[in-house]
């Protein structure tokens, strides 16, 4: 692999073992590791949690290496010997300690909770027999608690942990965990009276079992893992409950969003308080596996009791730990396709999925733990920041329609109102906490080798590329990723890493030997499934290069405005952009895209993010500040004469005033060591923007208003029909052996094998992101109804003229 720019060795980059299937069999291959300067710990936000910023600093850590959580040897037990090496997994699982558990008098504690008693008292006023009603209320509370959790069964727990250890070791090459991050969390867990809550991304339905196994095996106890919208059969629900899973009670989401006096919401809040008091770790998934980068409704329902527990003084504080999970290949794509169907997921379906999963390998998995931060400090700092909130930005809607600024103002919304109710303030706090934790979890997630390879094949080499060139680009993109303080989930020799990525993407590629050159030609299949699969993997790089991608799309939009004036494409070095023009386009794109989609901090104002984008474009060499006195062809800064001041109107009485009136200008510059850098960044957001453009036609062909859930399903079906995907998810009919490699006359295939494809369609995350963006910019308006949020199409966009303006606004940022 290529060396880092510093050229020195970094601690903590350990050697790893990998298995590659070269001839249909699993072969153990040792890969020597190289040393890098790698980010150790993703630190918390300094603006929202300044005291937590220095609470757990990595300079005091002693362990800086990686370990595989599924690699258990006799060193993990207190026994040694030949027999121990054969049964070390059983001995290790038997020695793991269950630190804490929910109290046995949990029912009495919940019933004596003030919030539950207030609900019972309000309902008992209409009842004649108070004693009879109290008994009925106690039975209702018992039924709600039974639906939330089940007592831990230690024999079943240890047996399932042993089976899960064997299953994960067969499913993945390794499950990597950083020792330094683990030491930080263990130190935070020793804080007296302060519980730990893990806020995790959600890539697969295996995540709950994986995190429960990791935390239990590393000495953090058996966590209570929240289960979102997954519908389980009674047997599977009982088994998951014995392992520590907790479920939302029926209708609790409506109760939390509406009246706070309903019994399920009160019982849930009281239960979470008791879990926190007993020092049990709690795992909350911030998103759904089918809707990444989007804060889910179950996550809001679980985060609300955390804020209430701190505000009511039930616990002195809570330490929140964002968790990022990365897979080379998501297991859900092959073994859990029915997890989101209408039928409940049963125990037999899970066992069949396990058997299917054991027939293949999904590469490596990586779990990253970010720096813990204080919830109490976050809440207090949020109240201070809200009181000092500045003037909001102008709406984007007039810019899209090309009209003067109407009476639209973000200050009229509930988030900027002068007075808000307590329920609205609590909802705002929960949303801000969830988005902030989701941003931290996405930022700490490691980038996989498959993600880098897929990004290069999708955004730089769309048709074909030689293996030697792909390896050089892989090393270049890897170095750029590490320089931006984002870690990767792999180490090893460059050729082995690229071949490993191509092996996992083999269903969408064709490889040919080039005998005269001694090289391999990688050909990307021309199909909608291939584009969607590569787009899904390459989305890992969007948070890494979000600022550069937004800046590149803004430059592309400014160049598009230039073409009617210059006729032919001028030399890029002869074009000068003013700082105001760049900020205008960057702000428009930042207002369009949700912050979590770009991995940006939701607490940072958009004007600060725009300046950060401009600074990063300058640092990476894509923009160069114009020297004083230089003149260039096509100076965009002189277009809008109404905005610019003539030099005779300026006051030159003071030298400082001359600097304040002088505009900064930039010109495009292509870095010599990074050819195609600008186009690559511009292509990075193309899948997202292309989905937005295709959704414009959906606005015309469907009736309004619609519920948000129905609108999301209809939009996803509309996009699938545009791709020509049938009921199998393939173009033109039933599935075909896409992994069958045949000779096409100019080269010999590397190997010949058949790998079945899985149904693919537009990811639900992009569908929800499209609806969220259309709501943010004013294309769709949301109103509340008994059936849920209703989406209305705003009047200007009900006509073909308004939709054409919206499409033109979106297409200006796309690299076609």
Image: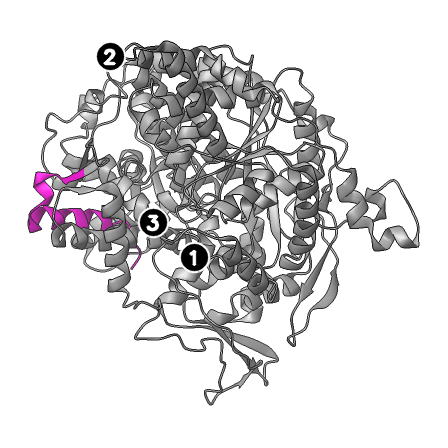
Q: CA distance from mark 2 to mark 3?
A: 34 Å
Judge the density around disc 1: few (<14), some (14-19), many (≥20) Cα neighbours within 10 Å. Answer: some
Mark 2 or mark 1: whose residue is earlier in sequence = 1
| Residue 683 as seen in the image, left or right of residue 212 | left
- In percent of width and height, residue 331 lies at 53, 56
| Residue 18 as seen in the image, left or right of residue 249 | right
Which residue is label 2 attached to? 418
Front residue of this view, candidates 251 and 617: 251
- In percent of width and height, residue 732 lies at 30, 75
Direction right: furthest residue: 81
Element under disc 3:
helix
- In percent of width and height, residue 718 lies at 23, 58
| Residue 629 as seen in the image, left or right of residue 50 | left
- The answer to whether residue 63 of the structure is visible from this angle is yes
Disc number placed over residue 766 in the picture, else none:
3
Q: Quadrant of residue 338?
A: bottom left
Q: Which residues are magenta?
A: 791-816
Element under disc 2:
loop
Which residue is label 1 attached to? 338
Q: Is residue 580 above or below residue 531?
A: above
Look at the image and say whether residue 746 sits in the magenta stretch.
no
Element under disc 1:
loop
Q: Quadrant of residue 208?
A: top right
């Amino acid at each position: 692999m290529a060396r880092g720019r510093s050229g020195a060795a970094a601690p903590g980059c350990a050697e790893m073992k990998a298995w590659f299937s070269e001839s249909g069999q699993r072969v153990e291959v040792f890969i020597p590791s190289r040393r890098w300067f790698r980010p150790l710990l993703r630190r918390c936000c300094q603006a929202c949690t300044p005291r937590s910023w220095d609470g757990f600093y990595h300079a005091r850590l002693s362990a800086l290496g990686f370990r595989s959580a599924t690699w258990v040897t006799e060193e993990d037990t207190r026994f040694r010997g030949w027999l121990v090496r054969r049964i070390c997994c059983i001995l290790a699982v038997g020695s793991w300690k269950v630190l804490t558990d929910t109290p046995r008098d949990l029912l009495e504690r919940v019933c004596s909770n003030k919030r539950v008693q207030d609900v019972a008292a309000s309902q008992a006023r209409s009842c004649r027999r108070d004693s009879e009603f109290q008994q009925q209320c106690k039975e209702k509370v018992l039924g709600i608690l039974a639906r939330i959790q089940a007592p831990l069964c230690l024999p079943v727990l240890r047996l399932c942990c042993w089976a899960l250890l064997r299953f994960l070791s067969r499913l993945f090459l390794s499950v990597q965990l950083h020792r330094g991050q683990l030491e930080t969390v263990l130190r935070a867990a020793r804080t007296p009276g302060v519980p730990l809550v893990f806020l995790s991304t959600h890539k697969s339905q295996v995540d709950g079992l994986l995190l429960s196994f990791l935390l239990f095996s590393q000495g953090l106890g058996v966590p209570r893992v929240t289960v979102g919208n997954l519908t389980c059969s009674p047997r599977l629900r009982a088994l998951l409950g014995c392992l520590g899973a907790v479920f939302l009670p029926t209708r609790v989401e409506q109760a939390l969003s509406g009246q706070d006096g309903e019994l399920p919401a009160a019982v849930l809040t009281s239960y979470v308080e008791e879990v926190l008091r007993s020092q049990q770790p709690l795992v909350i998934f911030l998103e759904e596996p089918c809707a990444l980068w989007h804060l889910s409704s179950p996550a809001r329902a679980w985060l609300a009791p955390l804020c209430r527990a701190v505000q009511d003084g039930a616990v002195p504080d809570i330490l929140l730990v964002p968790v990022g999970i990365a897979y080379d290949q998501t297991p859900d794509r092959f073994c859990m396709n029915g997890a989101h169907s209408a039928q409940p997921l049963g125990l037999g379906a899970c066992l069949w999925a396990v058997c299917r999963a054991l027939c293949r390998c999904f590469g490596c998995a990586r779990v990253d733990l970010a720096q813990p931060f204080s919830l109490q400090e976050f809440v207090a700092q949020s109240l201070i920041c809200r009181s000092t909130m500045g003037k909001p930005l102008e709406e984007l809607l007039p810019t899209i329609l090309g009209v003067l600024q109407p009476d639209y103002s973000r200050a009229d919304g509930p988030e900027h109102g002068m007075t808000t109710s307590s329920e609205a303030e609590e909802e705002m706090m929960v949303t801000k906490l969830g988005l902030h934790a989701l941003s931290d979890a996405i930022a700490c997630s490691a980038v996989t080798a498959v993600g880098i390879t897929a990004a290069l094949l999708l955004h730089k080499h769309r048709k074909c590329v030689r293996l030697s060139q792909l390896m050089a680009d892989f090393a270049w993109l890897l170095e750029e990723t590490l320089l931006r303080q984002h870690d990767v989930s792999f180490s090893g020799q460059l050729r082995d890493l690229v071949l490993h990525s191509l092996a996992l993407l083999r269903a969408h590629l064709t490889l040919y030997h080039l005998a005269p050159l001694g090289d391999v030609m990688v050909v990307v299949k021309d199909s909608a499934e291939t584009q969607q699969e590569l787009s899904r993997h390459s989305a890992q790089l969007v948070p890494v290069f979000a600022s550069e991608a937004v800046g590149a799309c803004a430059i592309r939009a400014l160049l598009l405005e230039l073409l009617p004036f210059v006729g032919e494409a001028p030399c890029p070095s002869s074009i000068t952009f003013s700082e105001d023009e760049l900020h205008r386009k960057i702000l428009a794109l930042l207002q369009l895209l949700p912050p979590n989609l770009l991995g940006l901090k939701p607490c940072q104002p958009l004007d600060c993010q725009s300046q950060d984008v401009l600074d990063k474009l300058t640092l990476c060499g894509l923009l160069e500040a114009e020297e004083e006195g230089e003149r260039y062809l096509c100076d965009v800064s002189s277009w809008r004469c109404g905005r610019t001041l003539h030099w005779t109107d300026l006051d030159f009485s003071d030298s400082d005033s001359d600097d304040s009136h002088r505009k900064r200008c930039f010109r495009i510059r292509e870095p010599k060591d990074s050819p195609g850098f600008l186009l690559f960044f511009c292509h990075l957001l193309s899948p997202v923007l292309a989905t937005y453009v295709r959704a414009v036609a959906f606005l015309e062909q469907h009736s309004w208003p619609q519920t948000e859930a129905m609108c999301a399903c209809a939009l996803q079906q509309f996009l699938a029909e545009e791709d020509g995907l049938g009921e199998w998810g393939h173009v033109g009919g039933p599935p075909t052996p896409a992994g069958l490699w045949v000779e096409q006359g100019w080269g010999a295939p590397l190997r010949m094998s058949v790998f079945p494809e899985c149904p693919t369609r537009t990811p639900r995350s992009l569908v929800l992101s499209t609806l969220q963006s259309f709501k943010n910019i004013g294309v769709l308006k949301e109103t509340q109804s008994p059936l849920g949020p209703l989406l209305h199409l705003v009047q200007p966009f009900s006509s073909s003229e308004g939709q054409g303006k919206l499409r033109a606004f979106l297409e200006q940022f796309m690299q076609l």
